[in-house]
Amino acid sequence: MRRLYRILLILLLFPPLLAAAAGWLSGPAFLHPIRRELTPDLIREADASFAVTGAYRQDFDVRAPDGVLLRGWKVVPRNPNGNWVFLFHGVADNRVGVIGQSEILLRAGYSVVMFTVLPTTASASSANRKFSFAPDIVS
């Protein structure tokens, strides 16, 4: 009987302990993924993509209301329709990660604003920012 209790105790405690250890070891990789930096090679790749669609890229710097400097690109198609679309990349990505979406929008005549949101990359901004400074970017 004592052996049965020991087996049951092991079966009840081992899975949660194993899950806790696995979470503790792998958690940082999921919560803090390695960021893809914006390199000159990636910028050349983006420029080549914009050239295919007949668009051109302009770098911009704008200061947010809280004083943080944001850096990004304004991309204007060959025949703009006057409308602008903001494209946001994922947590561990950069502006080049939304090139595919920008190609579709640029072909449809939309101008695109792409910038980096996270503080560890090219812009020093907060991920929970309110984007009330948009007129400063697209003007």
Image (cartoon, rainbow, N blue to C red):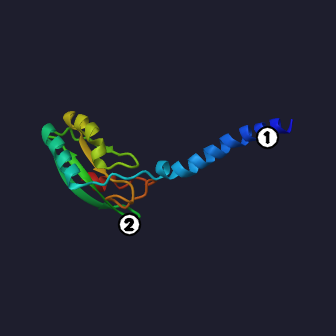
Task: Please tell me which residue is depicted at 22% across the width and 41% down the height of the picture.
Answer: 82
For residue 54, above or below residue 137: above
Q: Is residue 2 left or right of residue 23?
A: right
**Which residue is rendered at x = 39% and y = 54% of the image?**
132
Instruction: Give the crowd class for mark 2: few <14, some 14-19, many >=20 residues within 10 Å.
Output: few
Rendering coords of residue 49 (x, y %) = 18, 41
Residue 28 horizontal/vertical position (percent): 50, 53
Position in image of residue 61 (x %, y %): 27, 60
- SS assignment at label 1: helix
Residue 7 position, x and y percent, is 76, 37
Of residue 85 and residue 44, the one placed in the foreground of this image is 44
Cα separation, mark 2 vs mark 1, equals 61 Å
For the residue pair 21 and 36, the one nearer the viewer reads as 21
Asked where in the image residue 72 lies, by quadrant, the reply is bottom left
Name the residue carrying label 2. Answer: 67
Residue receiving disc 1? 6
Task: Classify the position of the N terminus by image quarter.
Answer: top right
Name which residue lies at 72% across and 43% down.
Answer: 13
Which residue type does callout 1 highlight?
A: Arg
Please, which residue is most extreme toward the right here? 1
Amino acid type assigned to the residue bearing label 2 in the image: Gly
Q: For the residue carrying disc 1, how many other residues have a C-alpha within 10 Å: few (<14), some (14-19), or many (20+)?
A: few
**Which disc number belongs to residue 100?**
none
The earlier-in-sequence mark between 2 and 1 is: 1
